[in-house]
Image (cartoon, coloured by chain):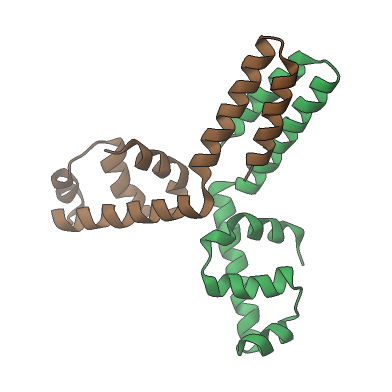
Chain colours: A green, B brown
Amino acid sequence: MNIRLVKLYDMYAALLSDRQREIMDLYYNEDESLAEIAENTGITRQGVRDWIKKTEAQLEGFEAALKLVDRSERLLYQLQTAKKALEKGNVRLASSAITTAEGLLP
Amino acid sequence: MNIRLVKLYDMYAALLSDRQREIMDLYYNEDESLAEIAENTGITRQGVRDWIKKTEAQLEGFEAALKLVDRSERLLYQLQTAKKALEKGNVRLASSAITTAEGLLP
């Protein structure tokens, strides 16, 4: 289980087919083994492995194209920086973090 | 020309094929007519029209799945609200807008 791939899946699941989501949910969210998924879906173990690899490559392709996970994390960092700055009364830093955040909008 | 579709195209062009982008660029960015695109690409006028309709449906499908244009506009509004609030010294409103922005992150 790869945290990056789970993040990509959370971000881009809506772009996958129902069948892809069904299998990836078993793998990522239900934490089922390839053998269990094979048994539950009627696909061979190798077929499940290929399916997951193909889907993961597709998720990486979505991120290469849109960079949503990357931008979202950098946006969150700037927003948190702005909030902490406001708590400390540093309006100038907060304002600069908000401007940086604007530049990161997709 | 539909402003919403141009925004969707700007957001999701990277998810389209090279051929789709080629035709949509002529249509959206070069503002060519269907007849001109047909002449420049060797496709029939009706073929160009079908191609554009199909691509626009796909763009709407991406937005229905990811809502990036919608979320990006709402995020921008919150960031602008926060900045204006800071300019007026309203730290509480700025902080609340930043919290709202965090909730809009994809």
User: Front-most of A64 and B84?
Assistant: B84
Image point (66%, 70%), residue name: A25
Q: Is residue A1 visible to us here? A: yes
Q: Is residue A36 above or below residue A98?
A: below
User: Front-most of B85 and A35?
Assistant: B85
Q: Is residue B44 above or below residue A48?
A: above
Q: Is residue B44 visible to us here? A: no
Q: Which residue is most to the right?
A: A88
Percent of width and height locating residue B46: 15, 56
Going by the image, does A6 lie left or right of A18?
right
Image point (61%, 78%), residue name: A50
Percent of width and height locating residue B9: 40, 44
Going by the image, does B6 lie left or right of A82?
left
Percent of width and height locating residue A61: 56, 57
Image point (69%, 56%), residue name: A7
Quadrant housing residue A75: top right
Q: Which residue is most to the top?
A: B88
Quadrant housing residue B95: top right
Image point (53%, 65%), residue name: A16
